[in-house]
Image (cartoon, rainbow, N blue to C red):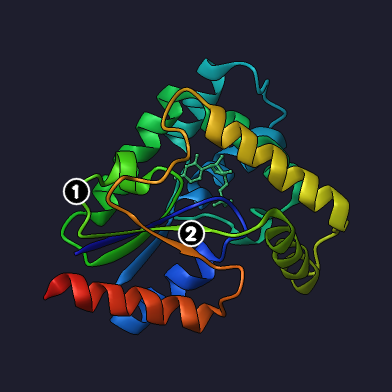
Amino acid sequence: MIITIDGPGGTGKSTTAQLLAKRLGYYHLNSGTLYRWITFNALQQHLNLNDSDVLLTLAKKLDYNNIDYNVLMEQNVSDNVAKIASIAAIRAEIVEIQRNYAKGKDIVVEGRDIGTVVFPDADYKFYFTASLEIRAKRRYAQMQKDGLEADYNSVLESISSRDRQDIEREHSPLRKAEDAIAIDTDNLTVEQGIDIILKEIQTLAI
Ligand code: C5P
């Protein structure tokens, strides 16, 4: 069984997907971490972010089983990840990794193109939205909690710029799958979001 949650950053996808998976006893895959891991390594190795061949070589040799999750939310990574995620060959590589990982598993997968491209035949699809201000506030609070350097206006600008790049890119742009259920999380707690998903799943399964 595959459940997908797509949507822009800061809509609560990750926390929801993680807790939903735990609740159901399913695996959980946050596909953004894969793109962020490539970005972190590219920055650390001072690679040319305009050279897609060099970036693809890096993407192919990275070990995705040993990701350092502590570095992925750094502002520098957030500011550059959308550029790297726009490269078609890198996306093809990451799509394969996701499909292989999910094979034979009950899993909740979250990202931008999961319901549209990675798992178009998923059993249940959801698409999260929330206002830019609420998303920036959530991301800012999370960064402060994690002890990361953060400035609210920069966080808001970074999220907005990433939205634009994710929506406007040529390959696998961020969009709602036609058969995905839209959930606006502006006024929802994580628990309420999970309850809505579980209710929808029960309804659709009948
Ligand atoms: O979900 P998160 O904000 O960590 O994703 C970081 C970035 O990775 C996104 O802004 C997007 O550019 C890219 N991404 C993507 N496709 C996915 C997941 C993430 O292009 N399925």
Question: Which secondary structure lies at badge 2?
Answer: strand
Residue 196 horizontal side relative to residue 71, left or right:
left
**Camera-side residue: 74 or 136?**
136
Amino acid of disc 2: Phe
Are dots 1 and 2 in contact, CB under 8 Å? no
Question: Residue 11 occupies which quadrant of the picture?
Answer: bottom right
Q: Give neighbour class at mark 2: few <14, some 14-19, many 20+ (Cα, 10 Å).
A: many
Query: In the image, is residue 15 above or below residue 23?
Result: above
Q: Is residue 199 left or right of residue 136?
A: left
- Name the mark on residue 128: 2
Q: CA distance from mark 1 to mark 2?
A: 19 Å
View extreme (left): residue: 206
Q: Quick one: SS at disc 1? A: loop
- Categorize mark 1 by other alpha carbons within 10 Å: few (<14), some (14-19), many (20+): some
Q: Which residue is mark 1?
A: 121
Residue 83, compared with residue 205, is above or below; it is above
Q: Residue at x 55, y 68 (%)?
A: 185
Picture coordinates of residue 101, whole percent (x, y):
28, 53
x, y percent for residue 121: 19, 48
Q: Residue at x 35, y 83 (%)?
A: 23
Image spot of residue 73 (x, y percent): 68, 55
Amino acid at the residue labelled 1: Asp
Q: Describe residue 154's horizontal placement relative to residue 175 as left or right.
A: right
